[in-house]
Image: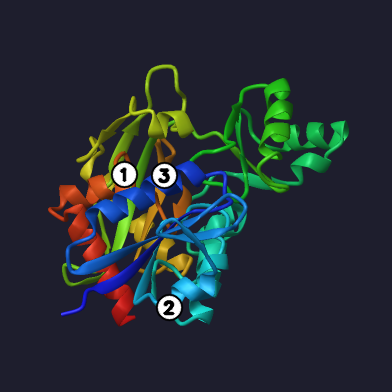
Amino acid sequence: MARTRVGVIRGGPSNEYEVSLKTGAAVLKNLPEKYEPVDIFIDKKGEWYARGVVTRPERILSHLDVAFIALHGKYGEDGQIQKLLATHRVPYVGSESLPSALGLNKHLAKEAFKKHGLRVPYHTLLRGGELNERQIVDAYRRIPQPSVVKPVDGGSSVGVYLARDFFEFKRALKNAALHSSLVLVEEFIPGTEATCGVVERFRGAAQYALPPIEIVPPRGKTFFDYEAKYGGASQELCPASFAAETKREIERMALAAHTALGLRHYSRADFIVSPRGVYILETNSLPGLTEQSLLPKACAAVGLSFPQFLDHVLTLAIRK
């Protein structure tokens, strides 16, 4: 019996290029035997390679049964690759084009969360690279301080800064604008970071919330930044130490966010658990699946191995 040909698409022009390579490598390594892996690499200039040979997208896509998108950030989570795959009628794992784009834009996603009754930090959207001194001062006064400054469409905490005073705020705007023309500024909510994955059609549920993971950044880190995520020094507690009621609230909000954005197959939402309540920060339509990533750890906590997870979502994509 012929094996199902799976194109694992990784790399790309995003600033999350390195994370994407690791996600793709982990997927290729853990695909069950029933699948025939096809390693599809996109370099930073957008050139496509299949099994190490330069190719055109339409040429390699025509030979696939299904695609696994291991891209992160721009081109992977902004709906572009999804449009291309749909044009060539290739089934793919993950959310469709418009929900992907909505999820990547942190401002639009927060507005969708608010409409569904989810608690989000106070926030505003700025054109970081075009602000004069007076506009920066006005923005600083408008947002409760300290504040978190981040590109509106980034991931893996790339370009995210905690500003404790005006000078840090001004510098953070400038640095975040290097990654995106639009910058999201939100109030800093003191508390404990948590994350919660969602898997569709699992254990009899249309949408199944995986157990929340509590994140304890290394000493000296205020939040879970890129270094904390991939440096291996953070503690990731699963099961989390939160009260049962708090865990249920995190799970409820993760499911609601998945629905609010219209996501598909799987996702992972990030939260802050504070004395004021649970706040949702963002939802990732294509969360990292590296050896250090959180979603595989949450799956393992409920007895779902990484190869089993891959088989499950690939089956969802093929059956559509």
Contact flag, marks 3 and 2 (Cβ < 8 Å): no
Q: Position of residue 313 (x, y in %)?
A: 28, 67
Residue under the point 40% across and 59% down: 51
Q: Nearer the viewer, mark 1 or mark 3?
A: 1
Name the residue beneath numbered marker 2: 90
Q: Position of residue 28 (x, y in %)?
A: 30, 55
What amino acid is at disc 3?
A: Phe
Give me the C-alpha separation between circle 3 and circle 2. Answer: 34 Å
Q: Which label's residue is closer to the chain start, 1 or 2? A: 2
Q: What is the quadrant of the N terminus in the image?
A: bottom left
Instruction: Indicate left or right for 184 with 238 as reference.
Output: right
What amino acid is at disc 1?
A: Leu
Instruction: Indicate left or right for 196 with 220 as reference.
Output: left
10 Å crowding of disc 3: few (<14), some (14-19), many (20+)? many
Contact flag, marks 1 and 2 (Cβ < 8 Å): no
Considering the numbered disc 2 on the image, is that residue within a helix, a strand or a loop?
loop
Give me the C-alpha separation between circle 1 and circle 3. Answer: 13 Å
In the displayed image of the protein, which residue is found farthest to the front? 53
Report the front residue among 305 and 265.
Answer: 305
Name the residue beneath numbered marker 3: 271
